[in-house]
Image (tube, rainbow, N blue to C red):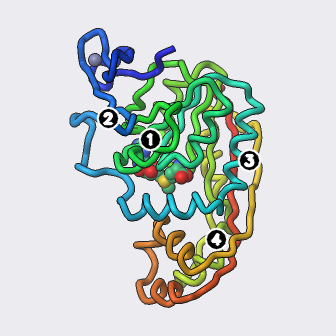
Amino acid sequence: MNLLMCPVCRQGLTLAGHSWRCVNNHHYDVAKQGYVNLHVVQHKHSKNPGDTVASVQARRAFLSAGFYATLQQAVVSRIGELRIENLLDIGCGEGYYTQAMQDQVMQCVGVDIAKNAIQVAAKLNRQVTWVVGTGATLPVLDHCIDLCTSLFSPIPRQEILRVLKPKAWLMVVTPAPEHLFALREALFDEVRVHEPQKFIAQLQDDFELVDQQVVESELNLSNEHLKNLIAMTPYAYKARPEKRQLLEQQQLLTVRASFQMYLFQKK
Ligand SMILES: C[S@@+](CC[C@H](N)C(=O)[O-])C[C@H]1O[C@@H](n2cnc3c(N)ncnc32)[C@H](O)[C@@H]1O
Ligand SMILES: [Zn+2]
């Protein structure tokens, strides 16, 4: 089944050779790395939107060292329980979670606005359909998705409602209140706790919360991974520079990661 939608005329796309085409003959070549760019100029606000190359590389190094494997496992096993066909991962980044999701479903589409992230992702797994695109106009057809996931990424509510089948699912993963508290204490004068419940409030008109789970793990970070963790988060530019410098001299840091996983169902 073809899930992708032409971003120009909103018709379905079919793969012919190395190109995705619609009935109106708009076509989008599959890049040699194996992804397709459906982020058309009309929808673009900047030339290289999304995360920077440095933050993508830092995230790749950190995640592939397995620090968030507990979360990956929790996400994947919850998805397995749903027994679904089509999954759309919104803001999939360099695909650490997305590629593991693929094993639980028939078709998995990973979309991200950052081309450099999708290029890294496409190398990981050839089964996932990797797309450069925007959450503002999700590049998939109406009512064909069983589960949308957004892990630390934007949640374009109207677009999610459009692409989901009736009674389909939305999984949101976001920092729990005390996520990386010791790290943030070292970087900021004042640490505000995260407020994951705000997502429940934002979504409650259209989605029912069916399940919530906190996933935690203790991270023992070497200096290298401490730097990667800082570089892959917004702390990199939000922190006081002198505090960041001081922290980055530390040879070892133990910190607790704490994630809130919500599963919603479309009303
Ligand atoms: C914090 S990262 C999370 C990446 C991935 N889900 C993970 O957990 O490793 C947020 C991602 O959202 C992407 N993003 C930001 N705005 C977006 C938009 N409007 N449409 C699609 N992706 C977007 C960024 O490029 C980035 O890769
Ligand atoms: Zn078209």
Q: Amino acid at mark 4?
A: Leu
Identified by mark 1, the residue type is: Ala
User: 88 and 72: which one is in front?
Assistant: 72
Discs 1/3, front: 1
Q: Which mark is residue 11?
A: none
Q: Secondary structure at mark 2?
A: loop
Circle 3 residue:
74
Number of other residues with Cα within 10 Å of mark 2, as a class: few under 14, some 14 to 19, many 20 or more: few
* Quadrant holding the C terminus: top right
Q: Are marks 4 and 2 in contact (CB under 8 Å)?
A: no
| Residue wearing tag 4 | 180
Does the residue at mark 1 contact the one at mark 2 (Cβ under 8 Å)?
Answer: yes
Sequence order check, earlier mark of 3 and 2: 2
Label 3 sits on what residue type? Ala
Q: Is residue 77 above or below residue 255?
A: above
Q: Secondary structure at mark 1?
A: helix
> Is there any visible trace of residue 8 in the rendered image?
yes
Residue occupied by mark 2? 31
Taking the spot 62% from the left edge, 23% from the top edge, the residue there is: 106
Q: From this view, report whether residue 166 is shown above or below residue 79.
A: above
Q: Nearer the viewer, residue 83 or 210?
A: 83
Residue with the most extreme top position: 23
Assign a secondary structure to mark 3: helix
Displayed quadrant of residue 63: bottom right
What label does residue 122 carry, if any?
1
